[in-house]
Amino acid sequence: MALNRSLARPVCLALSGLMFGASPALAGEGGDAEIRQRLEAMEQRIRQLEQERAELERSLEEPYISAEEPEIAARLKAVESQVNSYRQAARTVESLEGISAGVGLTMMAQGLTDTPAGGGKDGELNYRGDATVSLPAGTLGAAEGFIFTHFRMGQGLGLENPGGAFASLDSTSFQRPGSEASDSTVLLAQAWYQLDVPLPLSGNPDLSRRHIEFNFGKMDPFVFFDQNAIADDETRGFVNQAFVHDPLLDVGGDVGVDEFGFTPGMRLAYINDFYKPQQYGISLGVFGSGKGASFSDSLKKPFLILQAETEQRMFGGLAGNYRLYAWRNGRAEDFDGTVTAHSGVGLSLNQQVADYATLFLRGGLQTEGTVTFDRTLTLGGEWGGSYWGRGADALGIALGWLKISDDFRQASLTLDADGDGRPDYGYQADGSEQIAELYYRYRLNDQFELSPNLQYVRNPGGNGSASNLTALGLRVQLSF
């Protein structure tokens, strides 16, 4: 507090009288002179303190630290700046809570050991990029929601289906059909919302062991159905299309998605974790098919799929997933191009059988529809590199059979669905398309993996006179 200068002297004199009035050593004129000197020094000191206080106030009002300001002001500003930076960092962390993102780049070089009969490409290089972002979308009572978005880009069609094979040899390819390879395709692949509702509705959500999941938007149905721990990710596991998803749904086209593999739809699922780590669930999906999958028609006659699943612990407590599903597509295509209803059933399972070994099996049966193959079986396994001192590496082996249907066997020799006067296939289909794949995933670091790949296809397309196919490939995967 500043002191009025007119009051400073009387106050000081009064204080001095109290302090020194009783001292005989300061009595007389000599004592008065010394008192005056002390009062003047005290008054000068007060003026100096007032000046320093004013300078400190002016300095603190300035947002920046200057070289001329008092040291205490500089220190106070430094402390204030540090506190503000901590507060800003805390607010940033709070705003990012619940947000997750991932980026992946996949490149595949693949070639055939022999050029297929009738010509065609014997080698191809392609790339694909994927970027995903998951954002929290608030709460509805005790229910929590989030939004998932997925962007995809790429160039190159890969080897596709050489020699008339049903299944593509390269599921990592991504390019708009009919476009030039120089045109890099970029699109919003998925954008969907999920709401997780804990049960019972009136209970404590932190104690809930059951919940409902509801999704709607543009999505990949295989994110929610026909999943498999080691056989549903072509960027790290098997790349032959027959091993990535159920061949009847994917290779055969019964899933009904657009040309990129996505479709609008919704899903409702009930998940029971009461006996955790055992888990039980049932889910129903309704998705657009045909023109409805590309937003160019209504969602009438949709693709419907119902799946029951469970996670169990076997082989001494090792995890396994077992899924059984049935589907119906109201706008599927027969092999002659007729749009009609298709239906079928399938199963997908994976079971860890040892510390570093997991096996998988998929089976499918077409129950309605005129299709090229109507029964499928794929199986295989993945073994971790810990068995040979490379813990992050893995070796994968898979075998597959796509059984020719009786309808296709009878019609394949003379079928002319396009009406050009020439048979579409021109051979008598029989037996099964048989597929084998071997890969080794070699990890260089947490973000960089190399995977040499070998595939062999026997009786491609059920054509016994066609040459068998052998393809060699190298996949490069970068993940962040």
Image: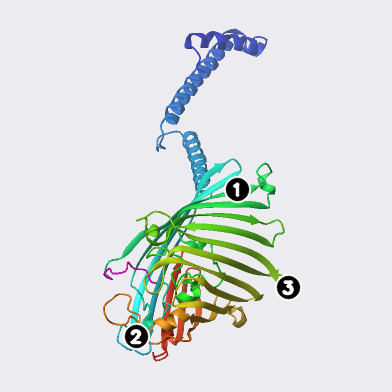
Circle 3 Cα neighbour tier, 10 Å, few/some/many (<14 / 14–19 / ≥20) = few
Of 137 and 268, which appears nearest the observer? Answer: 268
Q: Is residue 239 visible?
A: no
Dominant SS of magenta comes to loop
The residue drawn where x is 36% and y is 76% is: 158
Q: Picture coordinates of residue 23 (x, y %)?
A: 67, 12
Q: Amino acid at mark 3?
A: Gly
Q: Which one is earlier in the sequence, the residue at label 2 or at label 1? A: 1
| In the image, residue 414 above or below residue 185 | below
Mark identifier at residue 85: none
Q: Amino acid at mark 1?
A: Val
Of 475 and 431, which appears nearest the observer? Answer: 431
> Range of the magenta residues?
173-181
Of 178 and 422, which appears nearest the observer? Answer: 422
Q: Which one is earlier in the sequence, the residue at label 3 or at label 1? A: 1
**Which residue position holds label 1?**
197
Q: Quadrant of residue 464?
A: bottom left
Circle 1 Cα neighbour tier, 10 Å, few/some/many (<14 / 14–19 / ≥20) = many
Q: Picture coordinates of residue 177 (x, y %)?
A: 32, 69
Q: Secondary structure at mark 3?
A: loop
Of 330 and 181, which appears nearest the observer? Answer: 330
**Which residue position holds label 2?**
426
Q: Picture coordinates of residue 121 (x, y %)?
A: 31, 82
